[in-house]
Amino acid sequence: MDKVHYCERFIELMIDLEALLPTRRWFNTILDDSHLLVHCYLSSLVHREGDGHLFSQLLEMLKFYTGFEINDQTGNALTENEMTTIHYDRITSLQRAAFAHFPELYDFALSNVAEVDARDSLVKFFGPLSSNTLHQVASYLCLLPTLPKNEDTTFEKEFLLELLVSRHERRISQIQQLNQMPLYPTEKIIWDENIVPTEYYSGEGCLALPKLNLQFLTLHDYLLRNFNLFRLESTYEIRQDIEDSVSRMKPWQSEYGGVVFGGWARMAQPIVAFTVVEVAKPNIGENWPTRVRADVTINLNVRDHIKDEWEGLRKHDVCFLITVRPTKPYGTKFDRRRPFIEQVGLVYVRGCEIQGMLDDKGRVIEDGPEPRPNLRGESRTFRVFLDPNQYQQDMTNTIQNGAEDVYDTFNVIMRRKPKENNFKAVLETIRNLMNTDCVVPDWLHDIILGYGDPSSAHYSKMPNQIATLDFNDTFLSIEHLKASFPGHNVKVTVNDPALQTPPFRITFPVRSGKGKKRKDADGEEEDTEEAKTLIVEPHVIPNRGPYPYNQPKRNTIQFTHTQIEAIRAGMQPGLTMVVGPPGTGKTDVAVQIISNIYHNFPEQRTLIVTHSNQALNQLFEKIMALDIDERHLLRLGHGEEELETEKDFSRYGRVNYVLARRIELLEEVKRLQKSLGVPGDASYTCETAGYFFLYQVMSRWEEYISRVENTGSTSPDAAEVSTFFPFHEYFANAPQPIFKGRSHEEDMEIAEGCFRHIKKIFTQLEEFRASELLRSGLDRSKYLLVKEAKIIAMTCTHAALKRHDLVKLGFKYDNILMEEAAQILEIETFIPLLLQNPQDGFSRLKRWIMIGDHHQLPPVIKNMAFQKYSNMEQSLFTRFVRVGVPTVDLDAQGRARASLCNLYNWRYKNLGNLPHVQLLPEFSTANAGLLYDFQLINVEDFQGVGESEPNPYFYQNLGEAEYVVALFMYMCLLGYPADKISILTTYNGQKHLIRDIINRRCGNNPLIGRPNKVTTVDRFQGQQNDYILLSLVRTRAVGHLRDVRRLVVAMSRARLGLYIFARVSLFQNCFELTPAFSQLTARPLHLHIIPTEPFPTSRKNGERPPHEVQVIKNMPQMANFVYNMYMHLIQTTHHYHQTFLQLPPAMVEEGEEVQNQETEMEAEEETTAAQANLIPSPTEASLSQETPASQPEYSSQTETASSEMEDVSALCDTAPAAELGSAAAAEDAASVPAETK
């Protein structure tokens, strides 16, 4: 086997050399000369079924890359016609050689090319020739050395024949291969370990997988590798779902040889009937049907909510049709550790796409606003689309080889969760891209492929760099501007300090050529002073009207000089990459860039792409706070409902806004018409309003201007501006007086502002006129998307899913801004560049701004082989950083205390703190009731158990979970708001366990409540909270926290307090975690609390507290302490109420009030008594020995460790870790997300 592994590794090296242009240029010649491929194909290893399977797959990859469609010298991609020409040149040169020198090949030489270039034809013509003749033909074509006279060839005939045939046979084009490939995986791919390895991949062997390196041959190669990997990663997830669902159904062999299902699955149902109902004719030039449809009938004898899920399957949802033929008798137990296929007898898997459910008359029920019909009974039939390519292959196999008809055998249908089920649409998008001419901007092409100067797309090297930019409200003052450009000489065009106020236009020195400084005759560089001089021009925003809402919204953030550089770069053409460590204001920078582009280039459209809906919503909430007209905002996809605003920015929400706004504006026109005394109905439609503006409003305004400006006097009278103003009555509802009367210029500016207000009404109505002409909501929404919206936002997944629809609509944009770019898959970052058709063969894209942090978690890839071997977790952002594309690194954080920032700032170049982190009271005040602002708390085994694993990779740690919840309860009892505390963990199993414990201990208790979130570190990326309680779970091995990126995320979520529960001896010895854990272990490893210090405290952070500090040694002590503290609080409240009720009547003015108070106190007493029963005692199981009344007093907490263990002995005796995870958790365990590995 070592020799086999050596051969596999050798072929892998050959593929790597062929897949890179610099090495391919010289290596391809060597490979061609050595005829390595021919020798390999003739070797015995290829024909070995077991050992040679991977070798054969690698050989196919090598064959693909040796014949790749690229010119090795120029690096240009070859078209289909150019490849065909190369093939014809080869075969005609062979025919000429045959005609001139080999009479026995006359028939071949005179045949039509298309007749002889198939493998069978070539073998027919060349097979009868002798070895020597074959050698002579090959030597004539310069494939082999010349054969000396009177000597026999040393090569075998089989080799010589294969050499000639493989070189001259017609190859199917790569695009044709791709178009004929089924998009759904079948059982042959799903369980092929060489293609889709299991999660146990060790990293030692090689695999038949493409790799995402730093460089690619062409855009076609780039898309193809991503296509294959995306398809296989989806296949891995599908395999997990199939194994989970089918094993839950427990298929067994019945007594009569059929199939009986002993269990049930939420996501799968037995098929009652399956019928293919349509096979449409192929298109011209294709051999597969255009459409194949089938009907699947199932019996939904299940719970109502599961029945609703099945009936709720929408058009384009993907399902899988499965055939199982179990061989195990009824009652056989399933073992997850043994091979899955053998146990369940799985035979076939085919994908399908839902068209819709059929009604009683057999018609498809269409999705729409109309309510769905109520169907009787439990039998439901779904119309599905089958994959035409797969159907054609299966039918060909059945007819030619006599194989079984797959479509007569299906007995299970499986659905998947909608969020995980968009793989087919993304694959179709990539395939469509490969069938079109991918036009990316010239300035981006080489960088995407990884060649050339990585800084060539930086704005300083762009030929269309813009000299003067309006920074709008970016700067708060002239001092802020000067501080933002250190090392630059700032020249202000006005000398009066009173006029040096924002907004500012800045003129930058633009370097000539490709960013090189000009040189004078002596070769000396010109005066660098000029290159460092900025010309600043303050300007006044024109008056927009007399109403308060006319005043523009302004930015209030004092950006740092690096943030200003990022904003400046984002406004210039080219590629801008911003690396934003945690808390450095990435979103604020993104929003300011969007706002500045909006104001500088009002005709341009900007596309915003993020990884998650949450990030998109955060961006939108901040965009709305800036001076951007909301009619120009549009949000695509499902996620706008999570926006914390009453406004709806979805497509139909914007349509409703336009219609409502149109009515409001027409009412304003009506009021204006009335104020001017004009008869008629000018406010009937947008069109009539336009005529009214042209003939009535403009004429009055022009007359007014001529009267005011042509007075003839050298010093015009300010009173005239007000006297002749024609719209006094209309503006009667504005703050009065409108005109100040101080100066003619000031009043004229106010008058022009009033006219701008009126003009804006009619400008908007003109834009809304289309909504009168277009009658349907769909047409109106399309118009908004294509014409009206200037800032369009969507997630990367939505862009991948809807590319075809957007291109078909004629969607256009000029700029792209990507947030969370380091979390987006490479292909999902690339697709948004191509959501529009090129203009005259060129892309209209001018700016691409990517904002992210490659030191935090990468895209989620569940399969370790794809993650590590294929490097699929590398985002395009990370690749650009590795290639050397210039970045702007934000270097000041304002989220966390400086001490908390030190836990992760070692991972960044120069990450410091913003001034407010030291100055604001919330950062300088200590955390009440806790001695330290961050602490690592050592948690030993509880009842002899550390981590447990009730299901594979479903890690839990009961001791840590109870400790975390106890500290949360303690903080809430001190007065901390529960929503300011989040509980994080590194594994899904622990998340479910903690949620379960919170439900048992305090979830429904009004005195404590629930934390803001209980989730995993991976899911909490991009979010923050004041106080974070973190459980690291593992006690045997470090696990995936060894990835420093996950550590950075975990350490950077807290603003004011971070408390980590872990097995210290395990994590402090991990080399990768040393920088953080050396700081954590410098503090005591037992929790230090100050029970008598309520929240909030006036104690400064780092001060020695005036109250007594108590050291908690272990979890049982903390649990018992919190219980006693709670009981003391209840008893104190109860005692206070009783004392208050016994006050003498003289202390209260009216007896009626006393009665009211008594009634209220009695009600409160009942509430507190109920609350006392809400929190389970740590000794709940042994309460018969000791009643709550006899609990130790809150002040006496000096019990021995042994008695504490007795007190808590019942804490989890009846709840082992495997049971504490909720039912949902157990079901999730089989499909383990990335953070559980």
Image: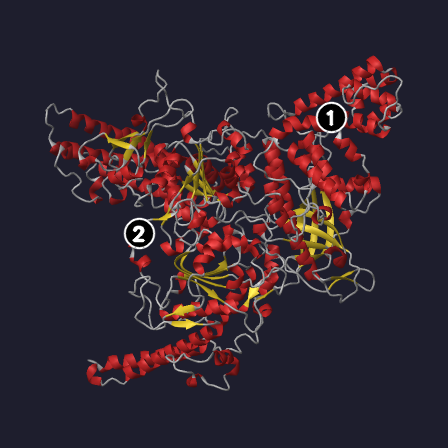
Number of callouts: 2
Mark 1: few/some/many CA within 10 Å (<14, 14-19, 20+) = few
Q: Which mark is residue 557?
A: none
Q: Mark 1 belongs to which amino acid?
A: Asp
Check the picture and name the quadrant holding the C terminus. bottom right
Task: Specify whether 970 is left or right of 877.
Answer: left
Kind of residue sitting beneath label 2: His
Residue 556, image quadrant: top left
Q: Which residue is mark 2?
A: 916
Residue 1192 lies in quadrant = bottom left
Q: Which residue is labeled 1 in the image?
A: 33
Q: How is the image coloured?
A: secondary structure
Q: Is residue 1202 visible?
A: yes
In the rendering, at what x and y percent does residue 183 appear? 66, 42
Asked if residue 278 lies left or right of residue 697, the reply is right
Which mark is in front, 1 or 2?
Answer: 1
At x 53%, y 42%, the residue is: 875
- Residue 360 sits above or below residue 157 on the image: below
Whether residue 980 is situated above or below residue 99 in the rendered picture: below
